Amino acid sequence: MTRVPNVTLNTGAQMPQLGFGVFQVPPDQVVEPVLAAIEAGYRSIDTAAVYGNEEGVGKAIAESGVPREDLFVTTKLWNDRQGYDSTFEAFDESLTKLGLDYVDLYLIHWPVAAKDRYVETWKAFEKLHAEGRAKAIGVSNFQIPHLRRLFEETGVVPALNQIELHPHFQQGDLRAFHQEHGIHTEAWGPLGQGKGLLDEPTLSSLAEKYGKTPAQIVLRWHLQLGNVVIPKSATPSRIRQNVEVFDFELAEDDMAVIAGLETGQRGGADPDVMGS
């Protein structure tokens, strides 16, 4: 079993730098992959209300036999539940489905700036954090203007921003802003969402050089940048491979080669228009 190192969030909480994502894993198929991930050494599980699989994730956690305090569980508030009072209702629903008394990290899934509810939503998040029911609070898919507004109108800096991030779309300015303000960067779609990244000849060459898979090369790149990363797979062999990235290190010139794969093209939705 692989032991994953932690990063320290701005709350002082310890979060595994590599976790297991369950986006697009069907509710009736999520238990076995989560159990396989926990057995392989993952201790961080990332889900969301909109994925529809919180209940299965909770069942896997209960069946794993791993003490609750040894696991780091993240879930997210969906767009149509934003607002002060509705946030508490949605949070309680997620806790019930997960079968937990608290989550380690609660995220606003998208800013949905057109509806202009993310500031009042964040104030509800602050209360959940103060009550200890969300040990840390953060955001997902927020851009610099959204983050600046949170700083100006509320009292708590997000612990983390989960964003689309991979060698084709590296978000350098946003990552630098996070670092300046003590916000951890977490990458979703870290392997490019099956849209050709892992077929890059550069990555195939590096995989051969290091005796690893292209996916392992990309995950190692993320880790050396300091990103938190949540690769998703339902295949047990790949679940194990994705966590076996702590026994080698990429040379600086190879890190630079991967940085050269930037295209500036998103694979997912644009946060400025998502939900508008």
Image (tube, rainbow, N blue to C red):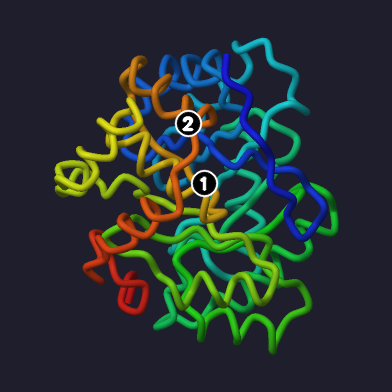
Among the two numbered marks 1 and 2 on one chain, the one whose residue lies closer to the N terminus: 1
Q: Nearer the viewer, residue 121 or 3?
A: 3
Q: Position of residue 237 (x, y in %)?
A: 34, 15
- Quarter of image, res 118: bottom right
Query: Disc 1 marks which residue?
Result: 223
| Quadrant in the picture for the C terminus | bottom left
Query: From the viewer's perspective, is residue 145 above or below residue 225?
Result: below
Q: What's the CA distance linking mark 1 and mark 2?
A: 9 Å
Residue at the spot 65% in from the left edge and 70% down from the top edge? 122
**Residue 215 badge:** none
- Work out whether residue 149 or residue 86 is closer to the camera in this orientation and state it: 149
Q: Dots 1 and 2: beta carbons under 8 Å?
A: yes
Q: Name the secondary structure under disc 1.
A: helix
Q: Quadrant of the N terminus?
A: top right
Residue 179 left/right relative to 231:
right
- Secondary structure beneath label 2: loop
Q: Check disc 2 and report the residue beneath it.
A: 245
Examine the image and state in which quarter residue 166 appears.
bottom left
